[in-house]
Amino acid sequence: MRLFLINLLIFISCGFFSADVLAWDVDEHRRLGDSVFNTVMKEIANFSGDIINFPVTTGGPIGIPKYLCRDRTFGDICALFARDDFRSDRFHDRGRSIAGQLRTLTREQIDSSWNALADKIQSDIPLFAGDSILCPIEFRTQNVISAYLIRHLMAMRLIQMAAKTNCSTALLSDALIMEASAQGYLADAFSSGHMLVPMEDILSPFHGRNNIEAHHYHRHQGVYVLNSRGDQWQTFGDELMHWSSTTYQPVFEACRSSLNEVLAVFYYSSGNSLPDALKRWLPSATAGFQPERAIARWLEHHGGGVYYADLRLPTLLLLPMPISASWSFRTENKDEYDIYRRHHYPQLRETGYHDPDLTDIDIEFLYPMADVPEWMIPKPLRGITPTGPYTLITTHPDWASVRWVQNRYAPPSYKGLLVRSGLQLVSAGNGSHAGGSIGLGYGIWDDLILFQNVSIDAVFMPSLHEAERTVLTITGGGGLTCPLTDRIKAFRFDGGLALGTNSDYGKSGALIALGIDSQVHHLKFTNAGIAFRLKYQWLFLEQTFHGPAMELIFQ
């Protein structure tokens, strides 16, 4: 009965202290989505009450409701599809470039998703039905970049179908709803909390609490990023989107570009002339391609990487990549302060393509040459000797090497699942016995004022003093902050029950332990850490068993 109550307490603690898993500020998605939608629509359409009228030259004006589905605006739908903030496909693949992440999205996968949508349309099944507005099909993608692109491509193909079927208002609305779902992912791609957490790690499901804490850590610390146009900035995370214009402007521009792409496809496919706003936007967004040719190429069927590296879909060029070092080139253009604008290129992993004097940076974020398109490699470095980078930055006044130094590994949290393994020496009377221990625990608090590492633990001791004795201990405890040295995190105290688990040694009693906890060492290969605990414990059974123990705690 006691064991049942302890397990119940652990279960309740798990549920209570992980309740903020879904604590995503959906209002940011709503505000961003509505701001983008209203800005774009005011430029290319006319509002008549709650109706948006698209001025077209064939077939007369086309009107769709401002509330696209069940009294929900574009922003409402963005927020609705962005509720589950900790899906693995809402995160970047840590340490991979945009090209590297899109490589996992194949043409077959995109076409299969489109065929599933087309089948529903042919069957006259409403794509978005019910109060929840669930997505009509399941998209299986590995990262936030692929998750955005596949939904965005579906929106463009839907609106192309709408344009070719007498400008179907139902399909037009469906395309905008699909684009709203895509923009939920697009906004997440700019969140620092979604860039450095290794959700693709196969061990990630076992330390979910660490993922949450790492997300929150990077959300506030921010991440230095650049995009494929050469812009560089520091982005922040959830609940900080509107905190700074340098954080908000890039994500707003990307979402606006994405919606422009969808609407440009509609006008192009329906045979109507582009509105003036789209005519002004397209030449600067299509990387030198003729606008009509660019739009036609967007509608071709390719794998995800082709849309980025070859077709240069405008919005993909705005997506951020974390960086640890960049080449900074002074352009001929000046800003409003009469200062020359800088164009940034990522420094690459191969010799001859990065500054040879890089210290204190994370080499993981020097991307390999195979993971960036050729047009992102500075021309002066192509095919030169290994000493070329040094010569470039010491002799050419327009080039500089920039280091972006920051802690890219969030300290693992003591909260959540804990795995314990240790060795102990137990004495009773005139004898002593060495044995092992293994256990599980749940960390409740990591740092609460003066208290550290508060947890509930269950540890199994297979041979305690006598070889036949087995004991299960159920304990709770925590520590006080150690002010003496940085190597020791806390002085710890534990108390609880020691339960004999076999009939010959079934005696139960109390347990107390005193010890010290080390600081946590990040394992690097996974988003978890290891700490050491030295302690002395007493088990008050039919006689008092006592002795020192050392434990490794994986957290």
Image (cartoon, rainbow, N blue to C red):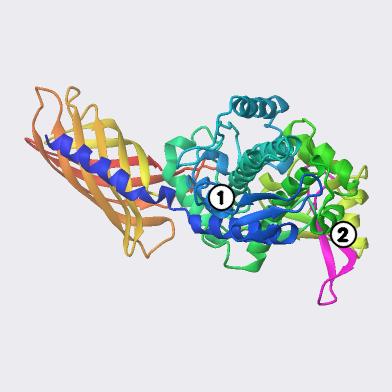
Is residue 437 among what the camera can see? yes
Residue 545: name its quadrant.
Answer: top left
Horizontally, residue 69 falls left or right of residue 323, namely left
Estimate how packed mark 1 is, as few (under 14), some (14 to 19) or many (20 or more) residues with alpha carbons within 10 Å: many
Q: Which mark is residue 78?
A: 1
Residue at 42% across, 48% down? 21
In this figure, which residue is indicated by the disc labeled 2? Answer: 393
| 136 in relation to 312, above or below | above
Q: Secondary structure at mark 2?
A: helix
**Toward the viewer: 522 or 199?**
199
Q: The N terminus lies in which quarter of the figure?
A: top left
Q: The C terminus lies in which quarter of the figure?
A: top left
Q: Which residues are magenta?
A: 329-356
Is residue 310 among what the camera can see? no
Residue at 60% across, 46% down? 185
**Toward the viewer: 369 or 191?**
191
Q: Which mark is residue 200?
A: none
Horizontally, residue 533 falls left or right of residue 536, namely right
In the image, residue 197 lies in the stretch drawn in magenta? no
The residues tagged by marks 1 and 2 sit, at their Cα atoms, a distance apart of 45 Å
Residue at 36% across, 41% down? 418
For the residue marked with disc 1, what is the amino acid? Cys
Residue at 10% across, 26% down? 505
What x and y, as percent, mark residue 25? Answer: 48, 56
Horizontally, residue 237 falls left or right of residue 162, namely left
Q: Secondary structure at mark 1?
A: helix
